[in-house]
Amino acid sequence: MRKIKKITVANIGKNNPVFMQILGICSTLAVTNVLENTVVMCLGLIFVTALSNTTVSVLRKWIPSRIRMMVSTLIIASYVILVDIVLKAFVPDISRQLGPYVGLIITNCIIMGRAEAFALNNKPGISFVDGLTSGIGYSYVLLAIAFLRELMGSGTIWGIKVMGDWWVNWSIMVMAPGAFFMLAVFIWVVKGKLIKEETS
Amino acid sequence: MNKKNKFKERIFMVLFMTGISAFFVSAISVVHLSTKETVRRNENLFLKRSVLYTAGIPFEKDPLEIEKVFNKKVTVSQNDGLPKYTVHSEKGTIKIYTVQGKGLWGEIIAHVGLFKDMKMSGISFIKQSETPGLGARIDEKWFKEQFRGKKGPFSTVPEGSTSQINEFDAVTGATITTKAVEDILNTTYKKLSKEYRE
């Protein structure tokens, strides 16, 4: 139980995949201009990290160490394709909007990173928790960025207009450079103000 | 002895990879096959909805209802290898063409509906991968609705200021996407003008 708590706190705070490990930046930049897409992306990622971590962990004793990367990739890819198929079949409109992003979950380094660094050396239960909390750590950062980008870039939240007519949209916010600015500011605030570096 | 062990290890590696690949691929295949029909139906329904929207025919959300309206009013044929729909509506016969062109990030494919006098009945985008929040706004209602009753060749005006029959509102911040839509429509008009004159 203590271990679970420790992992959760680490993955959300001091060991956060996005702002501490700087992983998964590609998707952070790509999908965060509209909140709705971000939510689906985050759910997909949480699902894939949690389950691929568990699967890799279950198989860890049999996976030959020389081909462990191949095996992990295969497992991750299978789950991603599963997500893609399910979206296409049951929520076709969202699937259409997300386009290639779902397939790109495969390339998210967080998943491979957790499989390699954690799942190969730990039991399935705790690996599941690690995958889940890594996914959540990634998600809340993305959601925060997406919230601000959509608000400033389109004056809307979840497609609903919230800013009045006086508001002039910052077009740059919904384009890629806006994501760089937002992410940089986010990392700066979090690292500079909230998490005190250990003084050496 | 050592050599033999190494050999064994390699064989195991190959067998393991083959086995695990076979397992995951079959699992995915099962899911794919069991949802194939739903996915195909979704895609068909999407196209039918798009055709009806382009023709300006109101329809209910219910899939069976859409199917019924579509089958009653629309006939499908081919035009340059792309599907062409002929819709018999109360306002006259509408021909809906599937047209395509190059957008900012990828292909844009649209349904464009024309009355006999070449006035547009509407437009609907069936594939586009423009920037969400900017170019992708061509798929929003305000943009698509403005084309009803208009006639090309078109020129664009700043967002919110269209007044002439051959103008349409550009999308602010999406110059290239707007230009792409303009090009697609104007090429369509150019291509079809001969056919319609006869």
Image (cartoon, coloured by chain):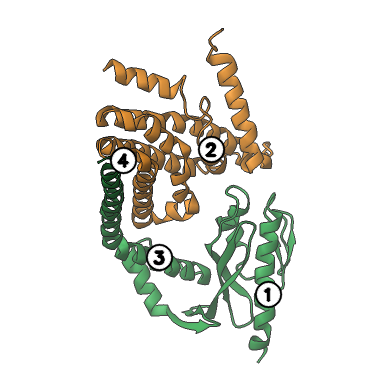
Which element is circle 2 on?
Answer: helix
Residue A162 is situated, as x and y percent measured from the top left of the image, at: 56, 37
Which chain is drawn using green? B
Q: Amino acid at mark 3?
A: Glu
Label placed on residue A64: 4
Residue B104 is situated, as x and y percent measured from the top left of the image, at: 65, 57
Q: Residue furthest front?
A: B1
What's the chain of the residue with tag 3?
B
- Indicate the quadrant where residue A180 lies: top right
Q: Mark 3: few, some, or many residues within 10 Å (few <14, many ≥20)? A: some
Q: Looking at the picture, do discs 4 and 3 lie on one chain?
A: no
Image colour assigned to chain A: orange
Label placed on residue B187: 1
Residue A123 is situated, as x and y percent measured from the top left of the image, at: 26, 29
**Labelled pair 4, 2 in contact (Cβ < 8 Å):** no
Residue in the picture at 51% in, 27% down: A21
